[in-house]
């Protein structure tokens, strides 16, 4: 199965600003996209190591306590082009502990330099001093009696370099500043593209099949869907499996880096009809992502439909509001829907998928079920700043622009960047 057309597949169909875009591209280099978490104490988890042009040699841990007096050790985790789950697994394996003993407040973009706060329950300090992982650094150690849980952050500070801009310097500055001024009034709180998977953007599609109870289809889609950016070895393994569905042979052919696929295939080679069991071989936190991605897609569709029908993002009769801001559903079996025109839109989006709210209670796979919630449909970027515009050293006859901005937790930088670039 080949899937490469990403056009509108995430339900993101409209812009919130009227200004002209600057074009360009993001994430050409990892250090072009820097994410620094603002923790629950309102302190910045500052990236220090991988934002430098010449990365220094590996360093040991920051100063650690000689003996743990409290239950948790908090650390700033800085990483470059590393998935958080991968790093946590490496740390846990090195320390000989369960991954459940490591807490974090939120996921960050893999293709970036990011810094965030993590907690480790009662680590072996002497062992921890010896920990070294390529592309990972630790800062600011502090003992605490509190575990860091999902959502325990204020927001994120982004520093982004947009490259290959084919405009004059003055025009670039003019368009960025106009977009900043418009964005202050609020923009649609879409879920960004990374919510749906980085290289293989099918998480929401698999989530749809899981909610509908099509477990075999979901598993086979996960194992065999290919994308252009994948390594040929992986693509070939997926294509072969799609032809013969020989799980034992596929287990030999899938590269070791395909950890989740291999875990599924190992289970299916023993129990070829147990597709729920195959999905359960994924880490628990990963299983939830499929349902969440599908909910996010439907949320985006509701927001887009509001704009298409002309009621926009401001509260209207029938809306359910939080702090004076209209919300849209993250559909679930206990989710309350709006009334009036907003309610009609919310019901129609669900109907178009052939679903009812009760379908989000998946009795044969309870752990992917969801009660649902509501989410604000607009957000307000803060501290937007144009840092510099320079000639781009990687693209001929082009400029690069470095900007920074702060977003509350749960909001996506790519949504604001889409407004600025419009390409």
Image: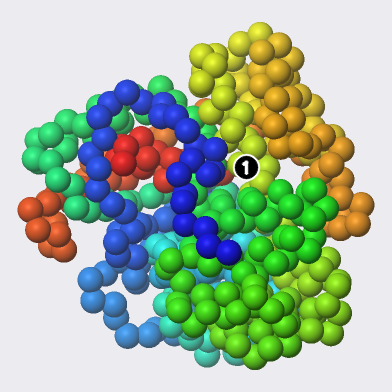
Quadrant that contains the N terminus = bottom right
Name the residue nearer the viewer: 372 or 51.
372
State left or right for residue 361 relative to residue 119: right
Quadrant in the picture for residue 216: bottom right
Name the residue rendered at 64%, 73% in the picture: 242
Report the front residue among 112 and 382: 112
Above or below 166: residue 246: below
Q: Residues within 10 Å of mark 1 (few under 14, many from 20)?
A: many
Residue at point 16%, 38% (across, down): 172
| Image quarter in which the C terminus is found | top left
Q: Which residue is mark 1?
A: 296
Q: Is residue 326 above or below residue 389?
A: above
| Residue 245 placement (x, y as % from top left) | 71, 77
Q: Position of residue 336 (x, y in %)?
A: 79, 27
* Residue at the outermost top position: 317
Q: Nearer the viewer, residue 281 or 133?
A: 281
- For the residue labelled by badge 1, is the local secondary structure a helix, a strand or a loop? helix
Q: Is residue 354 left or right of residue 41?
A: right
Labels in figure, total? 1
Find the residue positioned furthest to the right.
Answer: 363
In the image, residue 282 above or below residue 170 = below
Across and down, in percent, residue 340 comes to 71, 11
State the residue at coordinates (47%, 57%): 4
Residue 195 visible in rendering: yes
Q: Is residue 68 visible?
A: no
């Amino acid at each position: 199965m080949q899937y490469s057309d990403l056009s509108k597949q995430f339900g993101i169909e409209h812009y919130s600003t009227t200004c002209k875009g600057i074009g360009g591209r993001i994430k050409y280099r990892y250090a072009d996209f820097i994410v620094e978490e603002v923790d629950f104490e309102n302190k910045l988890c500052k990236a220090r190591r991988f934002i430098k042009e010449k990365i220094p040699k590996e360093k040991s841990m920051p100063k650690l306590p000689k003996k743990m007096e409290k239950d948790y050790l908090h650390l700033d985790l800085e990483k470059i082009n590393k998935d958080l789950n991968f790093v946590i697994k490496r740390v846990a394996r090195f320390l000989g502990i369960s991954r459940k003993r490591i807490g974090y407040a939120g996921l960050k973009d893999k293709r970036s330099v990011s810094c965030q706060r993590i907690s480790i329950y009662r680590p072996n300090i002497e062992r921890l001093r010896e920990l070294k992982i390529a592309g990972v650094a630790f800062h600011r150690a502090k003992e605490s009696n509190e575990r860091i849980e999902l959502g325990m952050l204020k927001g994120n500070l982004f520093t982004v370099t947009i490259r290959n801009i084919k405009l004059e310097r003055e025009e670039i500055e003019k368009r960025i500043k106009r977009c900043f001024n418009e964005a202050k009034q609020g923009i649609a709180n879409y879920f960004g593209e990374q919510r749906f998977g980085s290289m293989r953007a099918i998480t929401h599609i698999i989530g749809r099949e899981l909610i509908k109870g099509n477990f075999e289809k979901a598993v086979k889609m996960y194992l065999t869907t290919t994308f252009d950016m994948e390594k040929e070895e992986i693509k070939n393994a997926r294509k072969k499996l799609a032809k013969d569905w020989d799980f034992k042979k596929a287990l030999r052919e899938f590269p070791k880096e395909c950890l989740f696929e291999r875990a599924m295939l190992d289970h299916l080679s023993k129990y070829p009809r147990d597709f729920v069991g195959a999905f359960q071989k994924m880490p628990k936190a990963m299983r939830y992502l499929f349902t969440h991605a599908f909910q996010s897609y439907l949320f985006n569709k509701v927001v887009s439909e509001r704009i298409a029908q002309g009621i926009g993002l401001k509260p209207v009769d029938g809306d359910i509001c939080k702090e004076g801001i209209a919300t849209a559903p993250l559909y679930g079996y206990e989710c309350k829907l709006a009334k009036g025109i907003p309610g009609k839109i919310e019901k129609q989006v669900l109907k178009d998928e052939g679903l009812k709210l009760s379908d989000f209670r998946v009795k044969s796979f309870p752990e992917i079920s969801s009660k649902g919630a509501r989410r604000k449909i607009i957000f307000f970027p803060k501290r937007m700043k144009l840092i510099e515009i320079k000639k781009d050293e990687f693209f001929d006859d082009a400029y690069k622009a470095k900007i920074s901005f702060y977003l509350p937790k749960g909001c996506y930088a790519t949504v604001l960047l889409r407004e600025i670039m419009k390409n």
